Amino acid sequence: MSLKPFDIEVEEPSETLMEIARRELRETPEVREAAIEELRALLREAKDMHFSDEEDFLLIFLRPCHFYADSALKMMRRIAEFKKANHPLLHALKPEEEKLAFIDHNVVNVLTNRDQKGRRVLLVNCGAAWDPKAVSSEQLFRLFFLIHLVAQLEPATQINGIVVVLDFDGLSLKQVRALSPAFSRRLITFIQDAMPLRLKEVHILKQPYIFNMVWALFKPFIREKLKGRIFFHGNELKKFHQFVSPDLLPADYGGNLPAIDYTGQDWYPCVAAQTEHIEKYQRCGFVDEDRD
């Protein structure tokens, strides 16, 4: 069955993909089965937390942790802590609550194709295209959170990871003022501690001089591992092409593909279609939260 451009890919990994998983994540049928059973046992012992123990759900956490069950459990606990700390922002979050932000404002987008390494590419328009009065920084985070919940359903994305492109074209004080220290800390904490996806690279493009004010907000919260995966390109798109092939990039970023003619509006039905998984994920966390 052929996929539409805005579908997610939930089919079983190909042999080629499984070879990558074996090489990079230690994934073999034997390691996978043992890790799933070990994680289930650890979850039964963790009386203060609730997470689904279905195999496909556990793989969301085991793959980025290279099938070390104890590391996956630690990640689950960090996720529970993050959800508790951000309860007012994330409690009962559903796609329909952010529908207008998706369909009326071109702030977040995802390339319909993967890059040369099979990675999903998330685009965030942080410059002039973002009107903080229409889409607050809290909403921007909620959009990012919803997209990550959908991306984690794709085995190919679990294995190959994601690339984030932050486009700061036309950045002005209007956007800088919206990027508060609280938002900066929340976003970086989420990425480093509570996002069960393999974040391979972050590319910052078209940033003007005023971007230094933004970087000063984020820099104190960034640990060395993430810092080593952030790349600043400005308008030198050929530098960006050293990481993501121009043959798989749209003309908007100096690529050889046609300019982007789609937005979050096109992706919204895909996100909304995964409401069941989103609700399941939202039920996970500390036991006391489930009783709210």
Image: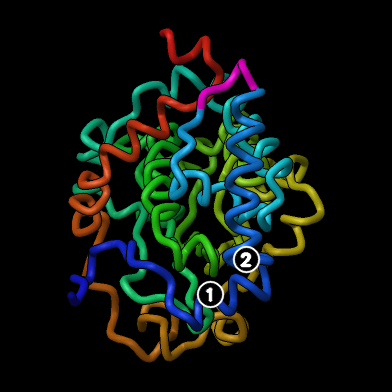
Under mark 2, the amino acid is: Glu
Q: Which residues are magenta?
A: 46-50
**106 or 157: nearer the viewer:** 157
Note whether residue 210 is visible: no
Residue found at x 22% / y 44%: 272
Q: Is residue 49 magenta?
A: yes
List the residue tagged with mark 1.
Answer: 18
The answer to if 159 sits in the magenta stretch is: no
Task: Quickly name the residue at label 2.
Answer: 27
* Image spot of residue 45 (x, y percent): 66, 23
Marks 2 and 1 in Cβ contact (< 8 Å) = yes
Residue drawn where x is 47% and y is 27% of the image: 284
Of residues 182 and 207, the one nearer the viewer is: 182
Is residue 287 something one can see in this rendering? yes
Q: Picture coordinates of residue 28 (x, y %)?
A: 61, 68
Q: Give the side of residue 191 with respect to residue 120, left or right.
A: right
| Precedes in sequence: disc 2 or disc 1 | 1
